Structures are given as structure tokens and as C-alpha cells.
Amino acid sequence: QVQLVQSGAEVKKPGASVKVSCKASGYTFTSYGISWVRQAPGQGLEWMGWISAYNGNTNYAQKLQGRVTMTTDTSTSTAYMELRSLRSDDTAVYYCARDLGMTTVTTTLDYWGQGTLVTVSS
Amino acid sequence: QSALTQPASVSGSPGQSITISCTGTSSDVGSYNLVSWYQQHPGKAPKLMIYEVSKRPSGVSNRFSGSKSGNTASLTISGLQAEDEADYYCCSYAGSSTRFGGGTKLTVL
């Protein structure tokens, strides 16, 4: 069965960086993309970006350009999302999700990780 | 990049039907048939309910249906059940990026 298992909760100080992992199993990792979505406490969903596990191409949300980097390790079927220069409003649950698009974003996110809480506080 | 517009809340009684709208622009909903809908219960990850405007993933009840007209997409839930009470988010492709709606809280009375 398809599973996406994310790394554990993180507490970071403002200005620091965080790297969240998302280990996939139960499917051919390189046949899909991975999107990252975050949700601030009590707020809605915010798309952060997408990476093709096939060729490593990425699309990032404009507001995060320059602060976010998404990568994959096909040898371990793991996707990573790194966010730098953290601010208090980056406090959120971060989700990875399988995107049906192998080479382009599709918005069809059919399997989701369990979420990783990142808290940014001094 | 503005979020898609959804009503903050809708409600209905068991057995009734409700529709949640999702209004975008000609740059997103109006230009692409890549609209999806997600259900989220408190403390849980979102679940895909509808993709590509009107397609249902395997395992999703046929009480859920999707449609689109112009810049507005809609999710209809028929035969409301208590377990349908949740937050619902629409999502649209917007030309190499993706936009979510602000979310709609569905209350089953």
C-alpha cells in the first residue's frame, strides 16, 4: 500500500533552517511528483511547491522563492523540503503529498503524509 | 497570487444535498480542468475527494460529485451523513503553480 512517512516535529529559532523528509513506499517513486503543502494553526492549506521525482524539476510558490528548496533521493525514495530564514509565521504543519504528475504539476494529490509540525519560536 | 474563493461555512441536515462553490479566475479555474477537492477532518491529513473537476478516486462515495462552469467549480454532496462534517478545500492548477481555496466548514445539523 502507498505510504508517505514524514520526519518528526521540529522546533526552530527565527532565522534558522528546517529540513523535512518524506519517505515513500508502495509505489514506483520516480513515476510521480511530490507536492508540499503547509497549514498554519487554524488556517487553510497553502501550496508550497512541487518536485518531479522523475527528473528533479521543481515549481515553487512565488512567495517562497529563494527560501525553499525541494529535492529527492531516488535511491531511498525520499523527498525533502528545506525552508530557510524561518519566521514565526512559518509555524505550521507541513505535509508532503503524492502528485499524479510525473513531469508537471497536476493538483491531484492522492496520498498524503501524516504531517510534520514545525514551530518557529525564540 | 490570491487564494480561490470559497464560502466560509455551509450546513445541511442528514439526507439533504449541499453545494460548495469555488470561484477563481481565467488564470486558474477558468483555464484548466485541473480542479480537485479535499476533505479534512480535525487533526487529520487532507483526503482527495474529486480530481480533474469531476473524477472520483477509487473508494470515494458516489455521493460526492464535482463540476465546473466558467471560473467557478463546485462540489456537491448528496445524502448528507454525519461523517461528512469536515473542512473542504478546492484546489486549481494556475500555470506551473497551484492555488487552494480558503476552505469551507461543513456542518451536518
Image: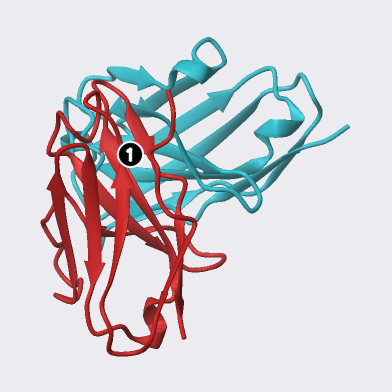
Q: Which residue is mark 1?
A: A77
Q: Is residue A64 left or right of residue B28?
A: right
- Front-lying residue, A92 or A8: A92
Q: Residue shown at 76%/31% (left/top)? A: A88
- Front-lying residue, B8 or B33: B8
Q: What shade has chain A been given?
A: cyan
Q: Is residue A63 left or right of residue A102?
A: right
Q: Residue shown at 14%/54% (left/top)? A: B67
Q: Check the image and tell me how it is coloured.
A: by chain
* x, y percent for residue B105: 48, 64
* x, y percent for residue A55: 22, 20
Q: Is residue B80 left or right of residue B100?
A: left
The type of residue carrying mark 1 is Ser
Q: Quadrant of the N terminus of chain A?
A: bottom left
How many numbered discs sit on the rendered protein? 1
Colour red, chain: B
Whether residue A76 can be seen here: no
Q: Quadrant of the C terminus of chain A?
A: top right
**Residue A11 sits in quarter:** top right
